[in-house]
Amino acid sequence: MIVLFVILFSVFYLFQINKMTATLCARKEIPEEKQPKIYKTINILITILLVSLYLRVTMLA
């Protein structure tokens, strides 16, 4: 049950982070050619954070 919650939370959280990244790119007028690199970096960092959350939750449960 906890694993399902973590997975659903992760999907929602990643979606929200991507929405905020899109807003950041629009407000700062970041060129189109740099945006994929920004998305990739942010998504990798957030994925590492979420994997560590998953491991911590499963180790404690």
Image (spheres, helix red, strand yellow):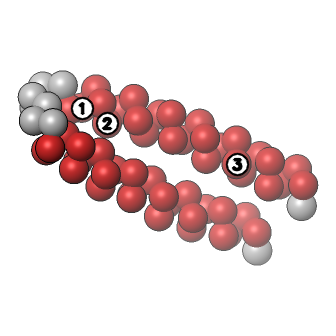
Q: Which residue is mark 3?
A: 53
- Please give the name of the residue rendered at 39% of the width and 51% of the height, measured from the top-left corner: 17
Instruction: Answer with mark 2 or mark 3, whichever residue precedes in sequence.
Output: 2
- Quadrant location of the N terminus? bottom right
Q: In this image, 21 relative to 58: left or right?
A: left
Q: Pointer 2: residues within 10 angstroms few (<14), some, or many (20+)? A: some
Q: Amino acid at mark 1?
A: Pro
- Please give the name of the residue rendered at 22% of the width and 50% of the height, measured from the top-left corner: 23
Q: Gap between marks 2 and 3, in whole Å?
A: 21 Å
> Disc 3 on helix, strand or loop?
helix
Of the pair 58 and 30, the residue shown nearer to us: 30
Residue 29 screen position, x and y as percent = 10, 35
> Disc 2 on helix, strand or loop?
helix
- Please give the name of the residue rendered at 48% of the width and 58% of the height, measured from the top-left corner: 13
Instruction: Answer with mark 1 or mark 3, whichever residue precedes in sequence.
Output: 1
Q: Gap between marks 1 and 3, in whole Å?
A: 25 Å
Extreme residue toward the right, this view: 60
Q: Amino acid at mark 2?
A: Tyr
> Disc 1 on helix, strand or loop?
helix
Q: Which residue is mark 1?
A: 36
- Please give the name of the residue rendered at 29% of the width and 55% of the height, measured from the top-left corner: 19
Please say if the residues under marks 2 and 1 sit with CB atoms less than 8 Å apart: yes
Extreme residue toward the bottom, this view: 1
- Quadrant location of the C terminus? bottom right
Residue 35 screen position, x and y as percent = 20, 32
Q: In this image, 13 relative to 19: left or right?
A: right
Q: Amino acid at mark 3?
A: Leu
Which of the 4 image quarters holds residue 58? Answer: bottom right
Q: Which residue is mark 2?
A: 39
